Image (tube, rainbow, N blue to C red):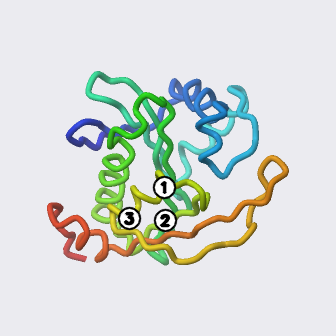
Amino acid sequence: MRISGSQIDLRTMEKGDLANKVRWYNDPEVNKTLLLEEKFELDKSLKWFETAKDDKSRRDFVIETRDSRAVGLIGLLHISKMHETAECYGVIGEKEFWGKGIGTESHLLLIDWAFKNLGLHKIWADIRAENTAIIKIIQKLGFEVEGTLREEKLIRGKRIDVVRIGLLRDEFYRANPELSKPSK
């Protein structure tokens, strides 16, 4: 599957993308923006992929530039048809693309697609409280901070606060009037 935007496309993650995922998630500068501490290994990622690719409660995409260069990952976890909710994640792994609008556009594409094609009512995420770059992106898209989970995670021996953000379908389309709202 491919979701096309103005400067990037989102395409379904494939096995061949896992080497980039491992490299990006293990990069100290990238990793310090995530809520993960583990060291990623290719063989474990390959095993994970064999299960994840058929898991209907998640959708994983690669963020690709117009010249087909993979620059990051984005997706949905914990997709609930019953509650019409999902958790969103995203990472720009190629640091030369930081601050170029790729994160904003990739989230815009994914969220619009999810509301229209999965019938979701709400998308949420947990982010590091000190991750100001993602906070700017989420505010542009219409996300609201729902609360701070104080000292929620222990990452590299340090307790960090986690901010829970949420976005309702109506809020998203009010914040992004250039997009057509789904009928449901």
Distance of mark 1 from mark 2, alpha carbons?
6 Å
> Which circle's residue, 2 or 3, is located before the other in the chain?
2
Distance of mark 2 from mark 3, alpha carbons?
18 Å
Tell me the quadrant of the picture where the C terminus can be found: bottom left
Residue 149 left/right relative to 134: right
The residue under label 3 is 139
Assign a secondary structure to mark 2: strand
* Image position, residue 116 (x, y; %): 27, 63
The residue lying furthest to the right in this view is 157
Q: Nearer the viewer, residue 90 or 50?
A: 90
Amino acid type assigned to the residue bearing label 2 in the image = Ala
Distance of mark 3 from mark 1, alpha carbons?
19 Å
The residue under label 1 is 76
The residue under label 2 is 86
- Crowd band around label 3 with a 10 angstrom C-alpha radius: few (<14), some (14–19), many (20+): some
* Residues at marks 2 and 3 touching, judged by CB atoms closer than 8 Å: no
Amino acid type assigned to the residue bearing label 3 in the image = Gln
Q: Does 39 sit above or below residue 43?
A: below
Q: Residue at x 29, y 59 (%)?
A: 112
* Image position, residue 178 (x, y; %): 14, 61
Residue 173 left/right relative to 35: left
Q: Nearer the viewer, residue 145 or 8?
A: 145
* Residues at marks 1 and 2 touching, judged by CB atoms closer than 8 Å: yes
- Which mark identifies residue 181? none
Question: Which corner quadrant of the image does residue 1 belong to?
Answer: top left
Which tag is nearer the camera, tag 3 or tag 1? 3
* Image position, residue 110 (x, y; %): 35, 53
